[in-house]
Every structure is written in C-alpha cells, then in structure tokens.
C-alpha cells in the first residue's frame, strides 16, 4: 500500500472520530490476483462511536466497483462492492459472553494503538468477495450458447429402435 492510515482504535471510538477518503484499487496488493483490472478507486468512510459495555466501536463503509474474473467463462465480471461492517474493540484479555460471540451484527477486534485502516479495509474486502465469482448467464470458453450442429450421439438414438 502506498500510504498507511493509522488510528488509535480506542481514542477514535471514544471521541466519535470520522475519517473518509479513497483508496486506489492498485494499492490493495492482496487483491491483485483476484482482479482482472486494478484501475479505479474505492471510497471508504469510518465513524467512531461507543458500543455495548462502553467499548469503542468503528463503523466501516466501502463502496466501489471491482473487476473480477468470472470462473465460468474467464471474462471480466463487474462486481459492485457495498461493504458495511461494525467492529467493537475489546481488551486483549477480556472474555466475551456467549451472546456476544453469537451476535452476527458486529465483529470483535483487539484494541490497538496503531490500527492500520487500509489493511482493515483490504481484509474486509477479501472476506466480502464471492468465493467463485461468475456471471448469471455465461458459457464455458469456446462453448456456444446455441449449438446448431447435430449431436454425435443422435446416430445412436436412431439405432436404438432397430434392434
């Protein structure tokens, strides 16, 4: 990544900090193998706040378009990214309750003095991408949507009734 953006996760949440910007897709090195084209940028917004049990929280929004490779036809696939995540920061030695562990509305992260925002954004994008990206309607490379040729097995269908 070209430039690191660091925040103190506790202070950012307690003070209700806000941060927004754009990250060039080309700087997201761990995404490079999944992309057909790395031009463009993604807009992000961070908002700090307070969560349950007076814990620092961070809301993350990432919007943009990525060009993935369709795993069926191997052509470019335009993927609209609209990522929304909520993080709650906890001390490293704190135990979470069973209810908190089962709550899918937020994720828990250890509190950090220097949280790398761009690394967090890249992590969340990697988790949000489809495992096997593909178009709704496409065919295998070299395949045709409609074949006008007669099937080589149609001859066998004609022999079936003669025996």
Image (cartoon, grey):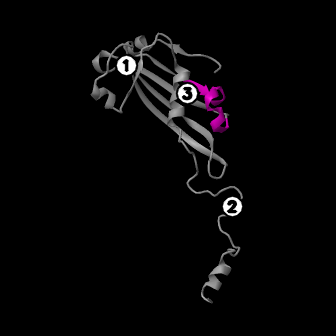
Name which quarter of the figure residue 91 lies in: top left
Task: Work out which quarter of the rendered image holds the N terminus and state it.
Answer: top right
> Of circles 2 and 1, which is in front?
2
Residue 125 drawn in magenta: no
Residues in magenta?
21-37
Residue 156, placed above or below residue 133: below
Gap between marks 2 and 3, in whole Å? 35 Å
Q: Is 11 placed left or right of 98 in the picture?
A: right
CA–CA distance in space, label 2 to label 1? 53 Å
Residue at 57% across / 42% down in the picture? 79
Mark seen at residue 143: 2
Q: Position of residue 45 (x, y in %)?
A: 49, 25
* Residue that mark 3 sits on: 122
Element on which disc 1 rests: strand
Residue annotated with mark 1: 49
Instruction: Give the SS element for disc 3.
Output: helix
Q: Which sits earlier in the primary sequence, circle 2 or circle 3?
A: 3
Q: How busy is the neighbourhood of tag 1: few (under 14 within 10 Å), some, or many (20 plus)?
A: many
Q: Is 39 placed above or below 48 here?
A: below
Q: Nearer the viewer, mark 2 or mark 3?
A: 2
SS for callout 2? loop
Q: Which of marks 1 and 3 is nearer the N terminus?
A: 1
Image quadrant occupied by the C terminus? bottom right
2 or 1: tag closer to the N-terminus: 1
Q: In this view, does 142 lie to the left or right of 77?
A: right
Q: Are marks 1 and 3 in contact (CB under 8 Å)?
A: no
Q: Is residue 36 magenta?
A: yes
2 and 1 marks in contact (CB < 8 Å): no
Q: Residue at x 55, y 27 (%)?
A: 122
């Amino acid at each position: 990544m070209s430039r690191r953006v660091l925040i103190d996760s506790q202070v950012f949440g307690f003070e209700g900090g806000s941060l927004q910007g754009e990250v060039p897709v080309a700087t997201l090195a761990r995404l490079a193998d999944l992309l057909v084209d790395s031009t463009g940028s993604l807009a992000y917004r961070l908002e700090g706040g307070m969560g349950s049990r007076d814990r620092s929280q961070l809301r993350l929004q990432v919007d943009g378009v990525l060009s993935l490779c369709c795993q069926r036809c191997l052509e470019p696939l335009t993927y609209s990214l609209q990522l929304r995540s909520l993080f709650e920061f906890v001390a490293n030695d704190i135990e979470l309750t069973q209810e908190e562990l089962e709550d899918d509305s937020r994720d828990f992260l250890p509190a950090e003095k220097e949280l790398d925002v761009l690394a967090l954004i890249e992590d969340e994008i990697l988790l949000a991408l489809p495992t096997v990206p593909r178009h709704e309607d496409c065919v295998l490379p070299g395949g045709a949507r409609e074949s006008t040729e007669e099937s080589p097995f149609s001859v066998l269908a004609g022999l079936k009734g003669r025996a």
